[in-house]
Image (tube, grey):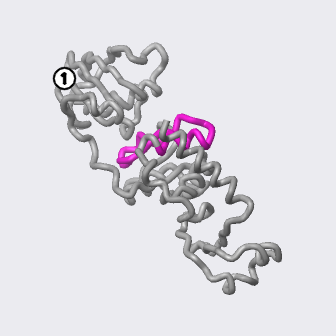
Amino acid sequence: MTMFEATFRFYGVLNDFLPTEQRGQPIDIAVEEKAAVKHPIEALGVPHPEVEAILVNRRPVDFFYHVRAGDRVDVYPYDWLSQLAGYVALRPPVPAPVCFVADSHLGQLASYLRLLGFDTLYRNDYSDAELAQISAEDGRVLLTRDRGLLKHKIVVFGYCVRETQPRRQLISVLRRFELASQISPWQRCVRCNGLLVPVDKAKILHRLEPKTRLYYDDFQRCATCNQIYWQGSHFERMQHFLAGVRAELTN
């Protein structure tokens, strides 16, 4: 096996995936002859869905470029694209409207995204293979804290959630995919992701508690799981939560 040396450098948030001593620095590594540039990028710890542009010796390339001896490889995230004179798109645009599939550690994030109206699949028993397959087949953005999951070859769209607190996770996803203007709350069931539809109170009267029957008249029902929603005491708290999220996104 023939090996040679090439130099890699990662920019912006891609440095999150590197050891401290390698961040923002040229990294000299041994590369196997005829290796596609995607392989050493991921070997260094950076999942391919996080990469948006690659320049080799200042020329744009795609993931299939074969690294050569002495190459200087610069690897960029999404928020550096406006600073590049030219680049090759590494994947098609994220389908619109954007939709997600979240791994088993992101249940609260999935609920928040549904609350804001975003189509988000979530089950706590999806395997890694199932998550990758769903993402690839449905064109869903795979949300995970597991960088190894994002390295699955078939994953096209993905985002590694760095934050641990669910509200911070939500803000990071909304910013990453520029979704502030697409927030449309009270459209989806936070339990199952089904669409909410108005329902006549008389049709669900038998399912309501006495005080709910007395004080509320407007209801929605999930078209998938039949969960009932109304603007009860929790609604004001959720309104406050949404206002805080919107305010933070404008800062």
Which corner quadrant of the image does residue 114 belong to? bottom right
* Residue at the (50%, 41%) spot, across then down: 249
Question: Measured from the top left, where is residue 84 in percent x and y?
Answer: 24, 29
Label 1: how many Cα within 10 Å (few below 14, some 14–19, many 20+): some
Q: Is residue 74 depicted above or below 154 in this figure? A: above
- Left or right of residue 43, residue 69 in this image: left
Question: Measured from the top left, where is residue 192 in percent x and y?
Answer: 59, 64
Question: Measured from the top left, where is residue 32 in percent x and y?
Answer: 27, 25
Badge 1 is on which residue?
A: 58
- Left or right of residue 197, residue 235 in this image: right
- Left or right of residue 143, residue 153 in this image: left
Q: Is residue 90 visible?
A: yes
- Left or right of residue 200, residue 63 in this image: left
Magenta stretch: residue 166 in it? yes
Magenta stretch: residue 113 in it? no
| Helix, strand or loop at mark 1 | loop
Quarter of the image containing the N terminus?
top left
Question: Measured from the top left, where is residue 155 in percent x and y?
Answer: 38, 47
* Residue at the (43%, 51%) spot, across then down: 181
Q: Is residue 21 depicted above or below 146 in this figure? A: above
Which corner quadrant of the image does residue 98 belong to? bottom left
Which amino acid, mark 1? Arg
Q: Which of 214 and 86 is in front in this view?
A: 214
* Residue at the (21%, 37%) spot, across then down: 88
Q: Is residue 202 depicted above or below 46 in this figure? A: below
Query: Which stretch did the figure color magenta?
Result: 149-174
Looking at the image, the residue that sits furthest to the left is 59
Q: Which of 113 and 139 is in front in this view?
A: 113
